[in-house]
Amino acid sequence: MVGNIIAITVQDFTYAYPNHSAVLQEINFEVRKSEMVGIIGPNGAGKSTLCKSLNGLIPHFYGGSIAGSVTVADMDTMKHSVAELSLKVGLVFQEPSNQFSGVSTKVDEEVAFGMSMMGYPREEMRPRIEEALHAVGLQGLEERSPYELSGGQQQRLAIATVLAVRPEIIVMDEPTAQLDPVGKTEVFQTMRDLNGKGYTIIVAEHEIEAMAAFADRILVLDHAEIVTQGETRKVLNEVKKLKQMGIDPPSVTELCEILRGELKIDEGKFPIELNEAISLFSRVLREHAK
Ligand SMILES: Nc1ncnc2c1ncn2[C@@H]1O[C@H](COP(=O)(O)OP(=O)(O)OP(=O)(O)O)[C@@H](O)[C@H]1O
Ligand SMILES: [Mg+2]
């Protein structure tokens, strides 16, 4: 259940990489605990930069100049180290193997690696490893080499390494971009399961149909600014605006926008998922047949 507790507050946040002009401009949004929020936008809009700003990599690792503030799990990212922030916010990257240590020969060692770097005692690790692998559906594969897993399994392992730390917030930067359709489905299902368990999830993602199905709210970034944000249906109904930015809305939404004269439905109420569109079309056909 999404409550009223605030997980993330981004306030008048402007950021420029060293010796560059700003790539995030006056960003404002809030995320409540247990929400699942999608970030969409064309290439270069600033999605990855925003993801890295949520766990302190920006500014601590990248430097650059900042105005405004980012607060995650009650911590100002300027005032807390990446190590402190990573206890509360886990970041999963696009390429699963980038996230791997490169030294572990087994799945369970890989999950342990991040924790051992953070100084967790051995006896605390075992239950956390089991819990994390179970949460992503990789139980039973503890002995397997991370490099012998499918793409979807590798990405789920990357998520498990983050989960083992028991963060409250998980930020994913295009976690399905490198995956085939089976892998994408596995990762989206994992995201949905984790969100169901109360994790707050922020995901930058090009798979608009998946966002339509999973996200509570969507932020649209374009040229360093948030151009629209709100409830998923409202944002995805802005078909023309999205297309102008080079973002394809869900196919069913676009079709309904084209047929809006025939369908007689108000803007803002177009279906965003296939099953909704099927019910709508069946109703319209029945009315036609009368
Ligand atoms: N380390 C860096 N130093 C300087 N500029 C950078 C750096 N990383 C990204 N940028 C620039 O910041 C802007 C935003 O990039 P970012 O990677 O955040 O966009 P994105 O929305 O994630 O794009 P994509 O969809 O291609 O992943 C781009 O103009 C990019 O060239
Ligand atoms: Mg990116």
Image (cartoon, rainbow, N blue to C red):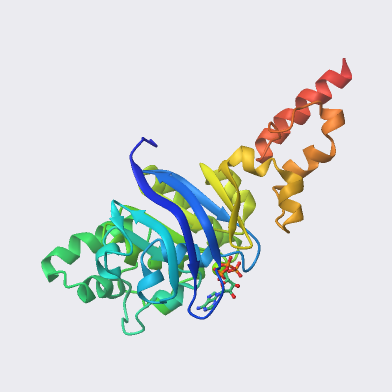
141 relative position to 117: left or right: right
Name the residue at 67% across, 33% down: 276
User: Residue lying farthest bottom?
Assistant: 103
Which quadrant, please, contains the N terminus? Answer: top left
The mark tally for this picture is 0
What is the x, y in percent for residue 233? 62, 38
What is the x, y in percent for residue 74? 28, 51
109 relative position to 191: left or right: left
User: Residue lying farthest top?
Assistant: 290
Name the residue at 53% across, 43% down: 217
In front: 149, or 236? 236
Say if 277 sits above or below 246 in the image: above
What is the x, y in percent for residue 161? 33, 67
Name the residue at 39% across, 37% down: 2
Name the residue at 88% across, 19% down: 289
Kindly indicate the quadrant of the structure image that contains residue 55.
bottom left
231 relative position to 251: left or right: left
Say if 195 sits above or below 63 in the image: above
In front: 269, or 45? 45
In front: 185, or 178? 178
In front: 287, or 59? 59
